[in-house]
Structure formats: structure tokens, C-alpha cells
Image: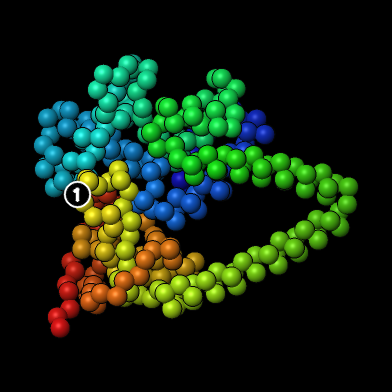
């Protein structure tokens, strides 16, 4: 899946390096957390915007659910649309709050530009910067803060490496060899950890738990989705099908395996059409006995 980053307009070389390092660190975290992540992608942001505008115009929530927006009820209570001139943004529903203090969610493709704008406006850094960010954006979490810090450290480290290579070309070869060996060691550690976790690899047909974000459920809803692994990719990601259909995003090995009744998934799950909150509608039958 590709993501179009809404970066800083006319960035300097230094800003470009920070942006690249920031997203290199943040993307794996979001893909690993999936439904439990508070920061989401632009696709979901646009769905929330559409639902809120539809409810404002008189569309019934039940009709939106029929259209595939399964979280329409939650979103319509939690968010609303605020208009700045010709622009429309999603904001968190808060009564009695001035317009300039309204909180809003941001999204993955735009979060770096939003943080950079706050930094330039007041030259804030460190904890002060993220206090300002969280005062405006409701879903800027510690993961985002850590990604920004890691980006700064990575840029600094790469600059030192470039300076060192300029002095000693052989050092570049030594660093490349060391990096290769570390990657091999990390792969071996990952393989051992997977075998120790639950007694072995998660296999196609295993029943698993997928965590659900607080934004996508009511207080009385379950915190997890029960699903079945139907496919494992070459990069060790898993495709999951649940009662409602196929989850659009792939999952990692960190999902929790369960020892439940075997579930039989129909062979035509690949033909299901995508609808709503990352689902594909398809049929599921529970094996008898």
C-alpha cells in the first residue's frame, strides 16, 4: 500500500532528511498496531469527514451503516465538521469551546507537517513542542513524539557517518558489513522469538484476536475482533477474515492466537468487495462438532 505524504512546502535539505527519518520510524509502528493506533491514515479521516457531513445534512446513521460505514454511530457522536472559510476539517466534539481552541484529529500523511508548523510558529522543542501539539491534535501520541525524537537522532547520526566516510572511505565498507551482520542477527532473534511465542509460528487457519481502537468502538463493545488467518505473505504479514468480512490492512505476528473452535472460511473470500471501515463483506461458516 502506498501513502502520499502531505509534506512541508518547499522543504530545505535538512527538513527533507528529518521528514524521511520520521516516517521510516513511524510507519512500522502504525502497521504493527493497526486498529489500536489512535493516529490513522487519510483514508479513514476522509470516511469520518463524510459520515459527519452526511449526518449534518440529515442522513440517518442506520443508512450510513448500510452503506458500509460500520462506525458511523461512534464517529457522529465523537466528531463534527468545522468550517474555516472554504475549508472543512474534522474536530472533536466539545461543547462550549472557542473556535481557536477546538481539538482535531490529524492523520499519518500530514502529521509531520502539522508538527513542523507548530515548531516554526513558536520555536518550541522537546516536551514543550508536544504539549502544544496535543493541545491542538487529539491523536498525537507518544509514538509520534518518539518518532520525531528518533528522526532527529537518525539525521544527526547519518551526518556524522557521512563526515566519517569523507575522511576514511574504508570506514564505509566496515559500517556496511557491520550493518549487514546486525540485520542477520536481528532476523535470527526474530525467528527464535516467534517460535517461543505460543509454541510456534501462526499458521493459516489459526484463530486470532485483533485489537480495536477506542475511536472505533463504544464503551460496551469488545476490545478485540476475533478473526481467522487466511493468508501469510512472504514478508510475514497476515491477512485476517472475521465474521463481518476481510480486514483491509495486513496484521503482524504480534496479534494474539486463540485456542477456539476451528472456523471454516469460504474459498471465495478473495472476491469480496471492500466496504466501510476496512472490511470486505463475505460469508463465514462455523464448523459443526
Front-most of 176 and 272?
176
Quarter holding residue 247: bottom left
**Residue 267 as seen in the image, left or right of residue 198:** left
Outermost residue to the bottom: 289
**Residue 146 as seen in the image, left or right of residue 75:** right
Q: Residue at x 52, y 25 (%)?
A: 118
Q: Position of residue 202 (x, y in %)?
A: 40, 73
Outermost residue to the right: 167
Question: Where 63 sits versus 127, above or below?
Answer: below
Front-most of 196 and 225?
196
**Residue 126 as seen in the image, left or right of residue 267:** right
**Residue 80 as seen in the image, left or right of residue 4:** left
Position of the C terminus by quadrant:
bottom left
Q: Residue at x 83, y 48 (%)?
A: 164
Quarter holding residue 38: top left
Q: Residue at x 28, y 40 (%)?
A: 47
Question: Where 86 sits versus 176, above or below?
Answer: above
How many circles with numbers are drawn on the protein? Answer: 1
SS label for mark 1? loop
Q: Position of residue 180 (x, y in %)?
A: 70, 65
Q: Residues within 10 Å of mark 1 (few under 14, many from 20)?
A: few
Quarter holding residue 209: bottom left
Q: Position of residue 214 (x, y in %)?
A: 30, 46
Q: Position of residue 196 (x, y in %)?
A: 49, 75
Front-most of 86 and 81?
81
Task: Name the colour scheme.
Answer: rainbow
Residue position marked by numbered label 1 in the rendering: 220
Q: Is residue 68 visible?
A: no
Q: Is residue 128 visible?
A: yes
Amino acid at each position: 500500500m502506498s501513502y502520499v505524504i502531505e509534506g512541508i512546502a518547499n522543504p530545505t535539505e535538512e527538513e527533507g532528511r528529518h521528514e524521511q527519518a520520521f516516517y521510516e520510524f513511524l510507519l512500522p509502528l502504525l502497521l504493527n498496531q493497526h486498529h489500536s493506533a489512535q493516529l490513522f491514515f487519510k483514508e479513514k479521516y476522509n470516511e469520518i469527514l463524510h459520515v459527519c457531513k452526511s449526518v449534518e445534512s440529515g442522513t440517518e446513521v442506520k443508512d450510513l451503516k448500510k452503506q458500509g460505514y460500520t462506525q458511523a454511530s461512534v464517529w457522529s457522536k465523537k466528531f463534527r465538521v468545522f468550517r474555516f472559510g472554504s475549508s472543512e476539517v474534522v474536530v472533536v466534539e466539545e461543547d462550549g469551546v472557542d473556535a481557536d481552541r477546538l481539538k482535531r484529529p490529524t492523520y499519518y500523511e500530514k502529521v509531520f507537517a502539522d508538527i513542523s508548523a507548530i515548531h516554526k510558529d513558536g520555536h518550541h522543542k522537546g516536551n514543550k513542542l508536544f504539549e502544544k501539539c496535543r493541545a491542538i491534535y487529539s491523536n498525537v501520541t507518544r509514538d509520534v513524539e518518539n518518532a520525531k525524537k528518533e528522526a532527529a537522532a537518525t539525521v544527526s547520526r547519518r551526518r556524522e557517518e557521512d563526515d566519517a566516510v569523507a575522511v576514511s572511505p574504508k570506514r564505509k565498507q566496515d559500517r556496511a558489513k557491520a550493518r549487514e551482520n546486525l540485520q542477520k542477527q536481528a532476523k535470527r532473534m526474530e525467528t527464535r522469538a516467534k517460535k517461543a511465542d505460543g509454541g510456534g509460528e501462526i499458521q493459516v487457519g489459526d484463530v486470532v484476536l485483533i485489537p480495536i481502537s477506542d475511536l472505533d468502538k463504544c464503551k460496551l463493545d469488545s476490545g478485540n475482533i476475533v478473526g481467522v488467518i487466511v493468508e501469510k505473505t512472504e514478508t510475514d504479514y497476515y491477512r485476517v477474515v472475521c465474521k463481518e468480512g476481510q480486514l483491509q490492512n495486513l496484521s503482524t505476528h504480534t496479534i494474539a492466537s486463540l485456542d477456539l473452535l476451528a472456523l471454516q472460511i469460504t474459498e471465495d473470500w478473495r472476491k469480496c468487495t471492500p466496504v466501510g471501515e476496512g472490511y470486505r463483506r463475505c460469508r463465514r461458516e462455523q464448523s459443526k462438532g
